[in-house]
Amino acid sequence: MGWVFSVGIFSGGLYGFTGAPAPKVTFADVAPIMKAHCVRCHAAGQAAGGLALDSVAGAVKAATPGKSDASVLMQRILGQGGKPQMPMGFTALSDREIGVIRAWIDQGCLAPAKSATSHWAYVKPVRPAVPKTKNGKWVRNPIDAFVLARLEKEKLLPSPEADRTTLIRRVTLDLTGLPPTPAEVDAFIADHSANAYEKVVDRLLASPHYGERMALPWLDAARYADSNGFQMDGDTYQYVWRDWVVRAMNANMPFDEFTTEQIAGDLLPDAVESTQKGRDKIVATGFNRNHMLNGEGGAIPEEQRNVGLFDRVDATCTTWLGLTMACARCHDHKYDPLTQRDYYGMMAFFNNVPESGVPDGGVPYSIAKPWIYAGTQEQMDRMAAMESQSAAAAPAVKQMEDSPETKAAQIAWEEAADPKLPKEISDILRIERSKRNPDQAGKVRGYFLDHALPAASADLRKRFQAMQKELGDLRGSIPRVMVMSDRQPRETHIFSRGNYDAPLDKVTACTPATLPAMPAATPRNRLGLARWMVSPENPLTARVQVNRYWQLFFGKGLVKTPENFGVQGEAPTHPELLDWLAVEFQASGWNVKRLQRMIVTSATYRQSSKATLASRKRDPENRFLGRGARFRLPAMLLRDEALAASGLIDLTIGGKPVYPYQPKGIWDGLAITDERDFTYPQSKGKDLYRRSIYSFWRRTVAPGNMFDASSRQVCTVRQGQTSTPLHALTMLNDVTWVEAGRALAARVMPLPTPEARLTEAFRRVCARRPDADELRILRRSLDRSLAAFKADPKSADAYLAQGASPRDPKLDRVEHAAYASVCLAILNLDEALTRE
């Protein structure tokens, strides 16, 4: 493999090893330390004391190669020579970090190699042999062999398999984003066949809700939103692209096709607007039209066009290659072998789109060309037929309007000067015909054609106008999705320091030089780029995607930094497993569901997440995978869980975005002009309870209850996971959860006893049955709530009034409020918020 040396080897000492030669240290090992401690003050453009430590050249100037003790850099780090110790006012470097820098200087200040072989991620993965392990019985598939080999190396043991209830809740949430129903849990527990779990997995992979769950991280990467962003923040129709993603996920579209259609679907031979299949290929290119659009009055179109190009390069390289390509926009990358020429060579692939850079205007929809109509096939066929009819009728109307008879009729009408004409028209008619300006002549001509044509001609024109209006109404009802197109060839130049108005050398479309080159026969356009992305020679794409799927199921990737597979990214914990999965993924025909099935049926995935004190101390982050992953559910899934458990959820798939509950006045701050009404248009009926993937996402004001969610302003491939009091306050008071608690209570109250009701409510949220102690706690909570609401029935009415769904008046209000409060507490249990 040739895995690059890691600074982790210094954990045993400063930089030497007794009885073994000191490993080579390059600036690639020093750079992360500089970034963490030094570059806030010592970087190009802010080189305090004349030291710029953000590049190998700058760091070498502060060192004396081969003599660390004589180096200014070491003296400042150690606080020698009468100078204060650096970094001043911040945490000092550790002994290990000082040892790395000392070793780098003493070994001659080696620069990182510039070839692709200098870093593991730039080397094509080769399928490693599946390791043999001592505990072969634990291994269910090759994934487990790699994981167990690492555990045995670390002298750790895998955890037992999770209980069945935990297992079905885990895999159901992971594959569909919804909790299992009690009936599904009972069926799994009752199924004693050897492949009972595999049958559950296959059912979930075939669920139409699988695509919705899998789409969420892809929408984050694609910075998908329903508005443009910036001050005007006009709405878009990009939900058509979102629905394409869901359909592609459900259909298990091979990832190489998924890639090709999003990067260059419009360049495929069958990409035509007249058929659903062809139209879908064009719609798929909306991936690179999801970026923000600046419609503000002072926006310079060409500047904004280039901002969009930058975004496409950054999003494409992060999503498919795991590269921090944006670092090479203004200068060569400080740490990875990526040059400014590489950056603009990539930009050239996207520089032929016939676009202005700013939206075309419109209220509330404000989109930018190129776009296509993306309706149903019935709508598209009807529009094509009406356009054909309109085109056929237009010559006759034009001929009639321009005929000598019509012109003579207009002259006679003007000379008659009907006193009932509008004053504006009468005033113009008093002006001699030859002296009227074009605007005046046009107004007279238009009025005559609209109101004074002879009967036969007027009938022809009215029928044509009615046809045009019907066609316009139909077009207005069809969404227009922004897409890619290569219809305006442009030259691409390197920009000095990234400034669009300071062009330097001309470049042509090319991929980064450090990676395998595009084959000579491959076209130098987006289609060629897409094929290069998924070519067997590309060392990154398969690894990057496999890592993100792993992150989906384990909370962290095998590479913890999915956005950065470069020198400053974290090395994989299981490099052989990552490579085996990457090669297997490609060999399977880029079959996503097959890969995911392998992961979720592995013994590694099926482990209990319960951790012993010893395992927590030995492996606090579970990087060795000795136990199941446990992490907080994303906010979108928390909302969906509450809606599903309560029975409120509407599982309709696709369509226009909806507007669930949000705080009153959430968009009021956007109302800076009278051009449009920014009052939040809360949905009604079932649309209030659609899955969170369909909630309208305004870039300037994201939904207030979507904690840690991506802003959808830039490409994001790793979502934050936090837990703060604000989260708890929201989920205990937001109408979404309060109403869900009320609906869940109404759902269980027909059961005969309090214990049965509480047990059913608990199961619908947590899947398992509460134990005796938990049931006693729930019962005490219920009794306290009953007493409180009996003492204050009006508070029960107020509590039950939250939410738009109707309440069953046959339910006792005090009892209903008490159960609702307990159900809300269940929805807020740690177990409910966590994917165990």
Image: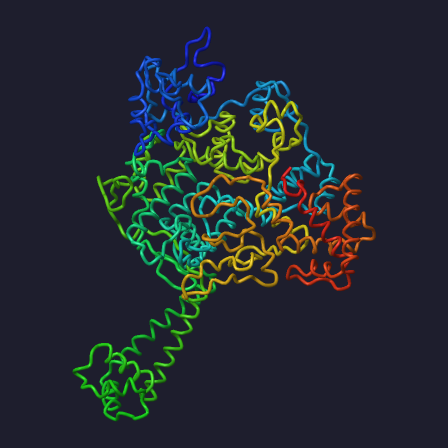
Q: Which residue is farthest right?
A: 752
669 to the left or right of 608: left
- In the rendering, at what x and y percent does residue 608 appear? 66, 31
| Count of marks, rendered view | 0
Of residues 260 and 479, which is closer to you in this image?
A: 479
Residue 261 placement, left or right of 748 = left
User: Residue extending furthest top?
Assistant: 19
Q: Place residue 831 in its image quadrant.
A: top right
Query: In the rendered view, would you say 778 is above or below 667?
Result: above
Which colouring convention does the figure follow?
rainbow
Question: Which one is nearer the viewer's eye here, 497 or 546?
Answer: 497
Q: Is residue 74 depicted above or below 728 in this figure?
A: above
Residue 248's spot in the image, x, y percent?
A: 50, 48
Q: Quadrant of the C terminus?
A: top right
Residue drawn at (33%, 31%) of the image: 43
- Outermost residue to the left: 434
**Image location (x, y in percent) of residue 384:** 40, 66
Residue 300 or 444: which is nearer the viewer?
300
Q: Is residue 764 left or right of residue 696?
A: right
* Residue 525, percent from left and from top: 31, 44
Compare residues 367 and 714 and report the one nearer the observer: 714
Q: Quadrant of residue 121?
A: top left
Q: Quadrant of the N terminus?
A: top left
Q: Residue at x 59, y 59 (%)?
A: 688
